[in-house]
Image (tube, rainbow, N blue to C red):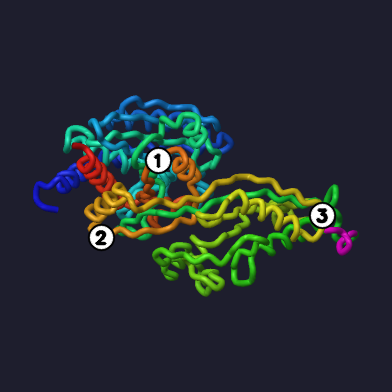
Amino acid sequence: MTEGSLAERLAAAVDAGMPGARDDLARLVALRSVANPAIEPESECRAAAALVGELFTRAGVDGIQAHPTPDGSLAVVGRTRGPAGAPTVLLYSHYDVVPVGDLAAWSTPPWELTERDGRWYGRGSADCKGNLVASLLALRALRSVLGSWPVEVAVVCEGSEEQSSGGMEGLARSRPDLVQCDALLIADTGNVEAGLPTLTTSLRGTGSVLVTVRTMSQPAHSGMYGGPAPDALQALLTALASLRDADGQTTIDGLSNDGVWDGAPFDTNRFRDDAGLLEGVEPLVGDGTVADLVWARPAATVLAIDCPPISQVTAAVQGEARAVVNLRVPADTDAAAAQQLLTAHLRAHTPYGQVEVKPVSLGQGFRARTDGPAYAAMRRAMHTAFGREPVTTGQGGSIPLATALAELVPDAEIMLLGVEEPASRIHSPGESVDPEELRRTALAQALFLAELGAVVTP
């Protein structure tokens, strides 16, 4: 960056805004905005929506409103008109978070932003309140340098993304005017490693089912009936075991499992470290690579099983057992069709008993278009902000809203990025954000908005 250049002035503005960004993040993290009233009070999400509205208003976004969505959550939406002929950029994030889980596993208070060893710890510090703060910081820096934004800026911050309950998707489909744009930044992903700018171009589709096996009206004494008594838990375990072969490859009848990832590889050692594999345990890759298994092939995971815990063990054959199975599929696979194949497979491979399989969640995958002017501008902005050439990656997780927005604004370029990186440990105890990632991501967004406006606006 040359002395006095726009890039340097924006970098200085972002640096100057970092203390305020930390204060904003601390206020957001303090709100226990889990969008499930059985876990945290609904008032926490309401307060978070109000705070998000306040922060965007202070940043200069016009017409901020909290819109009710079909699942009962609030989506904070606003839009500031830009110069004539300027493109519209929509900035997306979400303010809800996953539960904290086991408090004993946290070394810092989960609802208090705490600095330690140069990182900021707290639930949502990265996913996704840190991403929200990075966008706010970018907007403030750009306005302080230019006086106004060279593009039309729209914002959407939803309140139930982690629940996969479709609230924002329902609102967008009923009010497509709220999401109209030329470029869409989904700030809900991150970098493959700290300091390496990354654009996510592929998201897996997802579908979970609840499978229940019933064999008897009640448990039966294993001494009196064990042997001929049909064990519902054993039948369920047999069905679940059929979902993977000995090499870990997902084997669902009728579902292709030989895909090959054609993007950047996923280093095996990095995967081992990121996933926290124990000594002597290796990744399960079958006849493929880590990248193939994560981004190009289906993966069935048993998320939970209902059966007696060891603390309540009795000598009984179980008459009922159930499990939640999550299926992830490559971006180009129809998630609904794959979920139906999973349902049929579980029924076919349960050796006895009454089998009930119910869908729990469903989301289609997403593949980004990467050949447009906005994408090129973002690559240049990230290179300037990070000092490194950006890379692309897939993501094993799912963001169903990305697919819905691709349908609603088919001509818009959609980019996924964010402050998260492996050390952030999102969704786990000890979640944190590296403030340098937040700073660089904010600068990249500010540079992107500046270039996009300058390129298109007369």
Could you say which disc has been placed on residue 353 in the image? Answer: 3
Q: Is residue 308 above or below residue 261?
A: above
409 to the left or right of 133: right
Nearest to the observer: residue 95 or residue 122: 95
SS for tag 2? loop
Residue sitting at 39 percent across and 30 percent down? 77
x, y (%) of residue 352? 82, 58
Is 40 magenta? The answer is: no
Label 3 to label 2: alpha-carbon separation: 58 Å
User: Could you classify mark 1 by the number of other residues whose Cα lies within 10 Å: few (under 14), some (14-19), or many (20 or more)?
Assistant: many
Residue 94, percent across and down? Answer: 43, 39
| Magenta range | 225-230
Task: Name the N-terminal-most of marks 2 and 1.
Answer: 1
Disc sitting over residue 93 in the figure? 1
Labels 1 and 3: the sequence-earlier one = 1
- For the point 84% across and 49% down, the residue is 218
Q: Position of residue 184 (x, y in %)?
A: 36, 42
SS under mark 3: loop
Q: Main secondary structure of the magenta part?
A: loop
Marked residue nearer the N-terminal end (3 or 2): 3
Disc 2: CA contacts within 10 A as few (<14), some (14-19) or many (>=20): few
Q: Say what amino acid the circle numbered 2 marks.
A: Arg
Question: Around disc 3, counting alpha carbons within 10 Å, would you say few (fewer than 14), some (14 to 19), or many (20 or more)?
Answer: some
Q: Which residue is mark 2?
A: 388
* 3D distance between C-alphas at marks 2 and 1: 25 Å
Q: Amino acid at mark 3?
A: Gly
